[in-house]
Image: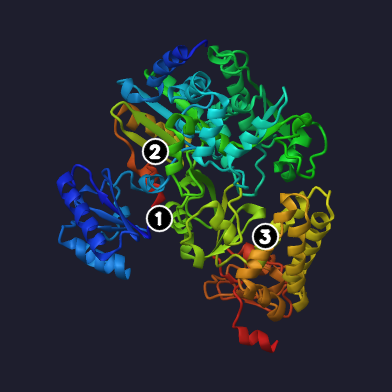
Amino acid sequence: MKSIEDLIKLRDSARKNINMRLNPGSIRIQIGMGTCGIAAGAKHVYQKFQEEIREHNLKNIILTPVGCMGECAFEPLVEILESNGNHTIYCQVSERVVEDIVEEHIIGGAPIEKYFLSAIKR
Amino acid sequence: MLERIHVIICGGEACSKQEAKDIKREFDRLLEQEGLTDEAKTVMTGCMGLCEYHPVVVMYPGEVFYQNITVEAVATIIEEHIKHGRIVEQYRIPEPFDRGKIKNISQLKFYKMQKRIALRNCGVINPLDISEYIARDGYFALAKVLREMDPKTVIDTMKQSGLRGRGGGGFPTGLKWEFAAKSVDDVKYVICNADEGDPGAFMDRAVLEGDPHSVLEAMAICGYAIGAHQGYIYVRAEYPVAVERLEIAIRQARELQILGRNILGSHFDFDIELRLGAGAFVCGEETALIASIEGERGMPRNKPPFPAVRGLWGRPTNVNNVETFANVPVIFMKGADWFKNVGTEKSSGTKVFALGGKIMNTGLIEIPMGTTLREAIYDIGGGIPNKRKFKAVQTGGPSGGCITEKYLDTPIDFDNLVELGSMMGSGGMIVMDEDNCMVDVARFYLDFTVEESCGKCTPCREGTKRMLDILNRICEGKGTEEDLDVLERLGKMIQESSLCGLGQTAPNPVLSTLKHFRSEYEAHVYDKVCPAGVCAKLTTFTITEDCIGCTKCARNCPVGAIHGKVKELHHIDPALCIHCGACKVACPVNAISTKPVMKEEHAHV
């Protein structure tokens, strides 16, 4: 990159990967993969999401690791960002829960409240 | 100014903006009239998700939810809740959290009071992809600095922001940069201190793992400001994930020519390399860290000369902590004044804390300076599990001290914590409840510093070891009256005569517990009792009515001191008991009590 203009170009094209509102119809799945998340099993959760996405042949999904989300006591954490602005945080996600999330939330469009961070914390 | 009470008014759609505004206006009017504006503050927020109770008002601390509030009700709340600390039951929402339909309230609670500056990208972007960092305006601060500012303006901006070193010392970062800039030499270095060693502290790791580019960007800005072209990140080999992500980040930045020669078309060159530490606590001290990078044994040396004058390989060097660097790009993007307005007058910005110990939400939080300890522990941390009573909070790790309930309402900043006999440290915050023995806690931290002392100066090498011997003696019930005085005297001597920060602060955990919990030490020494039931030798094990008669304890007792029939209450013979604690471990229903029996009984023994 030779100038700030190149930087601006890259930023503007990369924004749609982060901000789902700029990317209608797509879903971003973030897995908390700091050391805390990995220790709690986030790598298996990540692989399971990869498998499920392949199996169901899902398009327009951005699956990405992210750093520590802060709620280390409730790892592994998975955050789903949708283009309508909805954010959902699932906690203590296991491989079995991944199946439910993909089938009911990602495909079916119905978030599963019992796995919400807010439901498990109280 | 930090108010005692915060009144949060829901301004969501259902709460009808107008109603909420009227309520806020009435609160403000009455608070003004009663002269309470210094004590209580009103804030209007977005929808809380409690729409069925609208209009909703929440009182902090304590998080009391009031429903269906009218303008007329405001006076009652001010009179009862704010002035007298009494909850107004008629408006209270009994248990708003029990309801599944209130979606994000816990997330709200955890995140609402936080302010994420250093952690702005942690958990948001993919740390393995530089374009996601750039999508969040990453490297724009560097571009701005290179294009619009001369090194002096950069340093002035840093000074104006009031940012202080987040590694523990709290030294103004801008001043540090200025010292390095003023040293004349054609080779200078920037070092990022990522040797995070406090037990229970992991905020630097989280930044490196979640947002490595923010550190790289800040180091380049620092290099430009002080005239350095090479940076080193000194990170522990025990952080393999952080090391891997840093390597990837550096490679990607080089590929995009954000590191290397002629960065972003300017005439500025800067590159960064990693140096792995073997995990010695003393290498967090900057002169020891520099020695370690040079390939020498990691031991501190006398200051001055400071690293800004003679640092790495004898060249002027600026060393900053990870979290300090993570704040830097934001200061240039949003301006020094913006940053200065966050936090308190003398400690601007935020601080990341690692919450641990006896707390519901173990994890990482970032709060504005000036937030009280109570808010951090109860409102964000969720309080103490199992209905136990709060006893103390330990900040600053092995260099810090314990803070008692009495001081929980102290706003957190560098100077306040030092005044309380503790320190900010790198940001560990360990909460202790009634089941923690403070003598044992002090012993734990001292044991750590004894292990980690590099051995160069006598007070630290020998003194801390002797203090530990005394603590061990006290925990075994062999302490004498004289021991407490010796501990205090020795501790003060080590503080005054040690070479580096490790020794100078090593006695803090002992001295602060001795100050705030002297009675607990005295119980160990005079009554030979550990009030918390932790020190096994000073604990009387008894079996409570909860016993289900499973016989596990009897089978696990190595000396056959436990008697009882199957499905009947068991008993421990105190004459045979060797205080090993095997029964407590074996019991499936937690029926082995270690709480001291009445004091009088002990007096007769």
Badge 1 local density, few (<14 within 10 Å), some, or many (20+)? some
A23 horizontally vs B11: left or right: right
Whether label 3 touches label 1, CB < 8 Å? no
Q: Amino acid at mark 2?
A: Ile
Amino acid type at image mark 3: Asn
Percent position of residue B187, x then y? 72, 23
In the image, B506 versus B359, the foreground residue is B506
Q: Amino acid at mark 1?
A: Leu
Give the number of the disc on residue B75.
none
How far is the residue under mark 1 from the one under mark 2? 32 Å
In the picture, the disc for residue B2 is: 1
Q: How far separated are the C-alphas under marks 3 and 1? A: 28 Å
Question: What's the chain of the residue with tag 2?
Answer: A
Crowding near pointer 2: few (<14 within 10 Å), some, many (20+)? many
Instruction: Please report whichever mark, 3 or 1, sits nearer to the chain's N-terminal start.
Output: 1
User: In the figure, is residue B475 to the left or right of B592?
Assistant: right
**In the rendered image, which residue does mark 2 sit on?**
A89
Residue with the mark numbered 3: B508
Q: Chain of mark 3?
A: B
Q: Position of residue B27 (x, y in %)?
A: 23, 57
SS at badge 1: loop
Q: Quadrant of residue B552?
A: bottom right
In the image, residue B465 sits, relative to residue B347, either above or below, namely below
The verdict on a common chain for dots 1 and 2 is no
Residue at 56 percent across and 42 percent down: it is B203
Q: Are the residues under marks 2 and 3 on the same chain?
A: no
The 10 Å Cα crowd at callout 3, few under 14, some 14 to 19, many 20 or more, is many
Report the mark closest to the observer, 3 or 1: 1
Name the front one of labels 2 and 3: 3
Q: Are marks 3 and 1 on the same chain?
A: yes
Is residue B205 among what the camera can see?
Answer: no
